[in-house]
Image (spheres, rainbow, N blue to C red):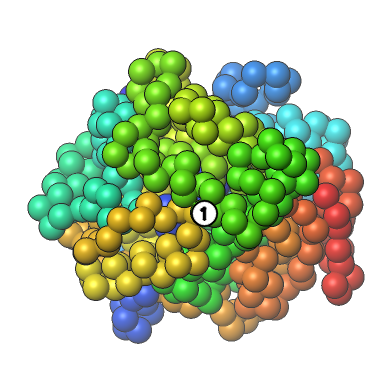
Amino acid sequence: MSYRKRSAVVMGAVALTLLLGACAGQAAGAEQAAGRAVPSGGGLDRFYGQKPVFKPCDPKLPPGVPAVEAECARLKVPLDYRNPKGRQAELALLRVPARGKDPIGSLVLNPGGPGFPGTEHAALTAAVWAKSPITERFDLVGFDPRGVGASTPALDCYTDAERDLGAKISSIPAGLDDWTERETRRLLEQCAKRSGGEQVLAHVGTRDVARDMDVLRQALGDAKLSFAGTSYGTRLGAVYAEMFPKKVRALVLDGAMDPLAGTHERRIQQATGMQAAFERMAASCADKQKQDCPLGTDPKRATRAFQQLARPLVDKPARTSDGRGLTFEQAVEGVTAAMYLEAMWPTAIAGMAELKAGKGDTLLKLRDGYHGRTADGGYPDSLEATMTINCLDEERHTPKQETAMTRAWFKAAPFTDHGRPIKEARDGCEQWPVKPTLGYPYATNIKGLTDTLTVSVTGDAITPHEGGINLAKALGGSLLTVEGEQHGALLAGNACVNETVAAYLIDLKSPAEEARCKL
């Protein structure tokens, strides 16, 4: 899939792929120590000495979003930091210059995923923050992480046709179309062939990207990094803090991934949060629509009501106007997509009511937004990049471990359960050429780190509030608790959140202990 076919990622979906298992990998102690070692010396001087040449560019923004004046450049980094004279990667950069005459420096942004382009995110953030003191005092800078978006080489595993036919990008839901050992071997071969070889697949983990971000910091002329990351971006920011603690000026970490929970534990935390959000969505439906609610009037029975609507799709997809049909997996993905923002709940409810009548158009549209599918059937590579990056960040499961985790997932989030027996689930990364490189837990016991700001929404289904509390504690930093029902709060347009974040970024003023905002 060419980059020209990749659609812009709107903020309502910047972290939808966390459902697909953005969980950290556990490496052995010696390997973890080696992974954290940061090489220095003359081998990297040519990368740290770069001066990117920014030229005016026209970023793609969602309809209705005002244009911003942006400039773009490229940055070279070593594919393997242990071999800086070897093969290189090239990162796409986008900068929106500060509006004021006295800028503090750059604010580097990451939208999450992993696998979403930071360039588009920076342009969108600049538009949303058009009147914020943050854009007056900072250049907003986004970069497409190695393997992502317009950076090269780019991760790519499937054709658009394969994606439309349901190409697997996660082991969940298991029990319907599980990977076989042969298929996981083919997945590796296909990803390697389409992405530039196994060497590329071995060097796209979060620790590689954190090193790239330090090269970027230097190239932008900043002595220390100011960073704002959402969702997976909180992992990237935390790992940067662990690797380069004395190079941190300010970190805003919004919608936090838990640095303490391993793959199994974090996925079940997430499944529990999603089930709770589904039940709150059902309660809202019952309260507002009464007898017309497709999930019934008793929220305690909503899961069963949804299962009765969705499970028949396993054997016979619901009809859709484009003839593609709506499968069980797609129906669950459509409902899950609505959990990122409370304002999207009515759309999901309408889709379930439509499904009750045998039609699947609304839920399929939500699912397509989840995957970034365009009207002409094109798919961005974002979810494929997510899967590939997570092969280096996740724990590598045996079939027994993967099967146990999937069963635990369905127990924690029964609205996603298709009702079929799970014989054996497999980790799609089981054939990967290298072991995971992130290591767990991460970002703990960091010495010399300045205060950080974690922003956590109480009703966040995708990155539950518990993870935000744990991240703030692990970093020894500040926590801003935000009451609400959505994933992340930085772009919510909330005055309380905006003022707190601006005071921290501009003046390095931390919020009071137990500070709270309400969406």
Name the residue that disc number 1 marks. 304
- Residue 131: image quadrant is top right
Task: Tell me: residue 433, above or below residue 339.
Answer: below
Q: Amino acid at mark 1?
A: Arg
| Image spot of residue 358 (x, y percent) | 46, 28
Image location (x, y in percent) of residue 306: 52, 47
Q: Is residue 510 left or right of residue 364?
A: right
Q: Residue at x 26, y 35 (%)?
A: 158
Q: Residue at x 37, y 26 (%)?
A: 325
Quadrant location of the N terminus in the rendered image: top left
- Residue 439 at least partly seen: yes
Q: How many circles with numbers are drawn on the protein?
A: 1
Comparing 229 with 466, the one in front is: 466
Which residue in the rendered view is the most extreme toward the front? 291
Residue 450 in view (yes/no): no
Q: Residue at x 32, y 72 (%)?
A: 404
411 or 32, which is in the foreground?
Answer: 411
Q: Is residue 466 left or right of residue 313?
A: right
Q: Residue furthest left?
A: 182
* Whole-percent x, y for residue 356 in the image: 52, 33
Residue at 47% of width from left, 49% of height from top? 307
Residue 107 in picture, x, y percent from top left: 69, 47
Residues 311 and 193: in front is 311
**Left or right of 480: which side holds 20?**
left
Binning the other alpha carbons within 10 Å of mark 1 as few (below 14), some (14 to 19) or many (20 upward) gives some
- Callout 1: helix, strand or loop? helix
